[in-house]
Amino acid sequence: MPKLPTKLPVRDLGNLPRDLVATDSEWDTTQQDPWLSTAFATSRGTVVCLRNDLPRGVQSRLDTTACELGVKLLYTVRFDSTNLLDAALPHLMPDAKANDRVRLALFFSPKDVEYVLGWDKFGEAIHSGRVRQRNNLAGRVGRVVLKDLDGWAGKSKLAEFAAALGVPMPDKTSMDDFKKEMRRGLEERPEDFLRYAVDDARVLLEVYARFVAFVRRTLSEILGMAAGDLWRADDIPMTTGRLVAETFERWLFSRTGEHADALRFCARKLGFLDPDADDYLPDRENRHILLDQCRTPEALAATAVDPVGKECLRIYAKSKYLFTALDGCGVRWWASRPTTETAGYNTLVQGGRCHNERPHEYATGPGLDVDIAGCYGTSLRTLTFPIGLPSVWSYHPNEKRPTLGEWLGRFESRLVPGLWTCTVSGSLPFEQDLLYSKLVKARDLRQAAGPDGIDIPTDFVLLRREVKNAILTADLLAALKAVATNSEWAALQKLEVVTACAYLAEDRKGDVGEWCRAVLAASDGGLRARVNAGAAADKRTRAWYGVGLEDFVGRLADERQRVKDRSRDAGPAERGLDQILKLLINTLYGVLASRHFSVGNTVLANNITARARLGVWMVAKALGLRQSITDGGVYTPNAVPHYRGRRPGFDTLPPRGPGTTRDTDGPSLPWRA
């Protein structure tokens, strides 16, 4: 076993909040009373609470090691009502009683919180809904705010996450021989046990400080965000999804300069107040006064310097909204649409292409694995994030709906590539394996509407001679036109349009200033009775402007490549920066597709996944993949198919049993290996 250091290293903890306390507990489930110890660490000191029934010799050795480490030991008896944090705080924070809040840093385990605060308080907080566990443990127990670092780590263990940030944990494996019998480890090797327990708590502080420092560096040096827009250790979101979503939102506003306040005002003007909010009625009246008064950027600026107007704007900014312009194309907005309108189907986001490409083959040999480099990241950096509301085509159950051909004939020239989707259904007289179907009940779409909604129960399937709620984008439409024979294209145009959503070219504004002027001048529209078949009942302005994601994703991806190029000589700083860059890039797609964040946008999310599905579909046809897995698959190198002639047609491309051919108005020869 490697020799352990006699002193815990003094590490740079940065500007951590003074009320941040990291904790970690050890227990042994083979014991009638499992609890063994709970360590508390702050930037000013460390306290370890230990059970008081340890042999005298063990306590003596623990005391000696604690003196070497500069650690305060408290021997105690613990019951379900015992609050160990209250016992430790006077030794960690002289002004602890005066603080109305303590931030408790932990990693993943609710058991740690139970031992720190006592089951009585923790259990009551769980049952009352003040504490919840999703991607991490979050909430508040009395004055204690939970800060679970597991929300940043994803599926990584603490040691892996710490290593990715360049934080070593040399003591992490020192007690591996006693994982199932920690009481025996404590009594046989108390020195190692104490170092192990203390280091686990102190590492949380360093991981916290380093993570925040790397995020701040990324936002400042790579994205060029101002100091006031950077996260601090006391306000940084504790899950990767929320961190990326709110960082992206801050970045959007940081780019608007002098128009930032106007953008926030206009985003709320296009939103809907929460009628269940306590101050809904006065907030609604205040909103009406402001919107009547502020019809131009100049009027808004004048209101902001008037004492009465300034107070009205403060109330307006704090009003509770169900939706704003930012989430006007998000999952929750679409899910909130009534089931008597097909607009709700815009809530569906299709995933990647994952299925057996050779269903008739039951044996296989050696193969090669091909991947599409930077699949989602590359798509993201080429797209535009729209701010504003999209145009919507929605139909009630009794209406006759247009065909795809009719819809394209009227609107195709007005569509912006990457910023529209069209959902279609219908049967086909030929086989195809490009368009996927999303099977869902209309009533189930609303399950994702509320803040605590659930994922919509759906089946994502490949129906070869029929499509149900298949989503078309500019990329998929171009592929259909390029591959389909004349008769196939005619059949595709007969598919029925279920719903469509688009940011139309004629509604696009040149920049944020022009957009704000258009929104301020528009009437305070809302939901109105429908008068024309297929016409959206929502009369709010459809003006929008776009922000290129190249300036966000592109900068991050380019910097990550530079970090990778220096990887051979990479130190802790480079490894930590790479971890943050990877997190921001890989999480952005999930944020856009999620119902939890205001910047979610199903049009963008579907365009990203459609591009990935199309890419791997083309690879599957070109290489004869055996299996597709989102952004790649396995193929047999000596059996790569080739084809000569004009358009093959979709009926030629799907895999078939041995010796099968199809006659179409295109070539009738099958692909050859």
Image (cartoon, rainbow, N blue to C red):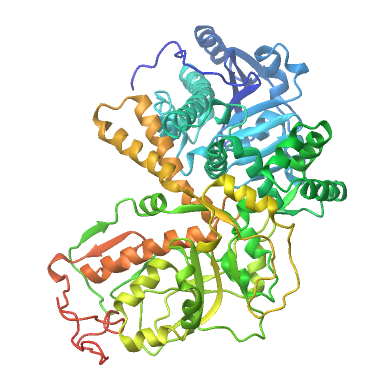
* Residue 597 appearing in the image: no
Instruction: Quadrant for the C terminus, please.
Output: bottom left
Residue found 48% across the figure and 32% down from its top = 219
Residue situated in front as seen by the camera: 470 or 506:
506
The image shows residue 407 at horizontal and vertical percentages of: 51, 78
Residue situated in front as seen by the camera: 482 or 354:
482
The image shows residue 297 at horizontal and vertical percentages of: 67, 43
Q: Quadrant of residue 524?
A: bottom right
* Residue 366 appearing in the image: yes
The image shows residue 350 at horizontal and vertical percentages of: 48, 65
Residue 600 position (above or below residue 88): below
Residue found 59% across the figure and 59% down from its top = 329
Is 136 positioned to the left or the right of 480 in the image? Answer: right
Residue 134 position (above or below residue 114): below
Residue 137 position (above or below residue 448): above
Residue situated in front as seen by the camera: 154 or 328:
328
> How many numbered discs sit on the rendered protein?
0
Residue situated in front as seen by the camera: 591 or 110:
591
Instruction: Quadrant for the N terminus, please.
Output: top left
The image shows residue 488 at horizontal and vertical percentages of: 35, 86
